[in-house]
Image (tube, helix red, strand yellow):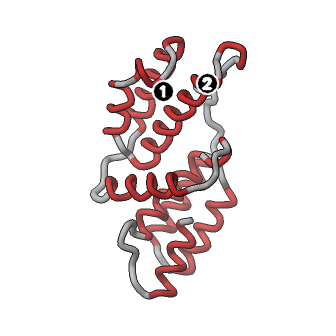
Amino acid sequence: MALQLAEGERVLQRPRKAISVHQALKLAITAASQHNDQASLARLAKLATLRQDNDLEAQVAAAQKLAGVSRDNTTEMMINVQDVDVADYERLRTCLSVIDLARLTGDARALAALESDLENAVPEAFHETMRKRIAETRVSLPEPEDGNEQLVAALERLKAASRCDEPSCD
């Protein structure tokens, strides 16, 4: 989507109002790095080269290096299907989506809100696991930047407008 925003800005010769291309590209780099998506990072590197944007090229190069490194997967959450009903599973999935979005955007307030409402947000059996996940995410958050609130709001509007209800769409 960031590449499409950049192309739209280039064709229309004007910036977007809701989200800057720079913000979208930075978010795309972070998301691709966190998901070890080398194909997306390669496309972003190509765009950085075409735009002759040295800062963006450096960010992509660092992300490619980070994505190439094997990481510890012991923090993955394993859920026994027999232990969780559909409604609880959906609540867990929603909380994990909030945590992932907060990690991508640096939104510490979303983590604080989730943590304060954890008793209502997830089943009691998962409180400790979710507290650990929130704490790990809070430690890894980048420094907040100006405009992140606008970015988060734009992403939430896009997600709400999506017609996809499949877990693969998150």
> In which quadrant of the rendered view does residue 16 lie?
bottom left
Establish if 35 lies above or below 121.
below
Image point (65%, 39%), residue name:
70
Q: Amino acid at mark 2?
A: Met
Residue furthest to the left in view is: 146
Circle 1 SS class: helix
Q: Could you say which disc has been placed on residue 96 in the image?
A: none
Which residue is at a point 57% across and 32% down the rendered structure image?
Answer: 93
Percent coordinates x, y for residue 38 in the rendering: 67, 56
- Name the one closer to the observer, 23 or 150: 150
Q: Nearer the viewer, residue 97 or 28?
A: 97
The reply to whether the C-beta atoms of the residues labelled 2 and 1 are less than 8 Å apart is: yes
Please give the name of the residue rendered at 52% of the width and 39% of the height, measured from the top-left corner: 97
Q: Say which element carries label 2.
A: loop
151 sits to left or right of 56: left
The residue carrying mark 1 is 133
The amino acid beneath tag 1 is: Arg
* Residue of label 2: 77
Q: Position of residue 136 (x, y in %)?
A: 44, 29
**Separation of marks 2 and 1 at Cα, in angstroms:** 9 Å
45 in relation to 132, above or below:
below
Q: How many numbered dots are placed on residues in this image? A: 2
The image position of residue 169, as x and y in percent, is: 64, 49
- Residue at 69% across, 60% down: 39
